[in-house]
Amino acid sequence: MADILTGAYTWLLALHLISVMFWMAGMYYLPRLFVYHAEAMENNEPYKVFERMEHNLMRIIINPAMIVAWIFGLLLLFSPGQIESAGYWLPIKLTAVFVLSGYHGMLSSWRKKFLNDTPPKSSKFFRMVNEIPPVLTVLIVIMVIVKPF
């Protein structure tokens, strides 16, 4: 197994990065849809189209991309020499990824609450939490590329 992981490392890395890009695209967009959805509900405007958009984004893009990102990420992590050569940057990066995964779960929960015809939070709240994925992205990329620790 170790030989397979070593030989496929660059492919695993490429597939991991592709899936992370899809995951993050959805994680950036879904809270923005929540902003528009909450605003429409607050202003008594039509909002049912947002429910369909949010559902499709979560089920077709975000969930599968996160699963694939985790699979390829774990395969990369367990490739020979990766854990042994990692510094403190790896636990920081993994912590940020766990936080991002938890945020993913919160987005899923909020999407379901929108289906009850009352916004789970205000549009202002969703504008603020929309900044979480970019901050985590910056932290993760710096930990992986710069490896400051």
Image: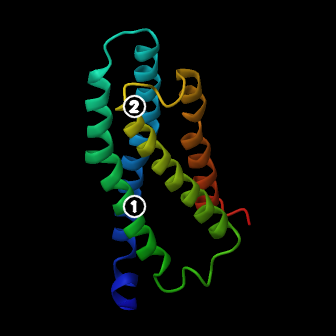
What amino acid is labelled 1 in the image?
Answer: Ala
Which is nearer the eye, 142 or 55? 55
Up-down relation of residue 65 to residue 53 (above or below): below
Quadrant into which the C terminus falls: bottom right
For mark 1, give the secondary structure: helix
First along the sequence among labels 2 and 1:
1
Q: Residue at x 46, y 49 (%)?
A: 104
The disc at residue 69 is 1
At 44% from the left edge and 9% from the top edge, which residue is drawn?
43
Q: Nearer the viewer, mark 2 or mark 1?
A: 2
In terms of image quadrants, where is residue 32?
A: top left
Above or below 41: residue 125: below
Taking the spot 50% from the left edge, 55% from the top edge, the residue there is 101
Report x, y in % for residue 90. 63, 69
Circle 2 — which element? helix
Which residue has dot 2 on it?
114
Q: Amino acid at mark 2?
A: Phe
Which of the pair 59/44 is nearer the observer? 44
Q: Residue 130: give x, y in percent of width and height.
A: 54, 33
Q: CA distance from mark 2 to mark 1?
A: 27 Å
Counting the numbered discs, the total is: 2
Residue shown at the point (37%, 25%) measured from the top left: 117
